[in-house]
Amino acid sequence: MGLHKNQTNNRSGRPKGRPNKKTAELRDKLKLFLESTFDEIQEEFKKLDPVQKLTFYEKLIKFIVPVMKSAEITGADGKDLFPPARTLTKEEAKIYLNNLENEY
């Protein structure tokens, strides 16, 4: 007879939900690296153009805000109510970035 789901014969094993030791060590090292180079990263960030800054924000935000599944919402006629977004121009990106920087 096999084991049931979520059952183990290894009573001294890693508890469910706890990261393994190597993952925890790597996260600690990455955290220390980022903390020790934060000022340098911040100075380099200031040199980026508005589009690069937005790309940087976009890549970091997923580690702060949970990622949501995308869903297609259609009207009664079956057409997409929210068509795909277009790419921002540099001027639009600059305006949005200025608004973000002024707000935070």
Image: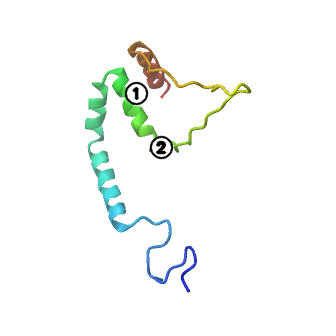
Badge 1 or badge 2: first in the primary sequence: 1
Q: Amino acid at mark 1?
A: Leu
Outermost residue to the bottom: 1
Residue in the picture at 31% in, 30% down: 45
Counting from the top left corner in percent of width and height, residue 19 is at 42, 64
In the image shown, does 26 or 36 lie closer to the viewer? 26
Looking at the rendered structure, the secondary structure element under dot 1 is helix
Looking at the rendered structure, the secondary structure element under dot 2 is loop
Outermost residue to the top: 91
Residue in the picture at 44% in, 24% down: 101
Q: Disc 1 marks which residue?
A: 54
In the image shown, does 19 or 46 lie closer to the viewer? 19
Q: Amino acid at mark 2?
A: Ile
In the image shown, does 89 or 42 lie closer to the viewer? 89
Counting from the top left corner in percent of width and height, residue 46 is at 30, 26
Residue 97 lies left or right of residue 46; in this view the side is: right
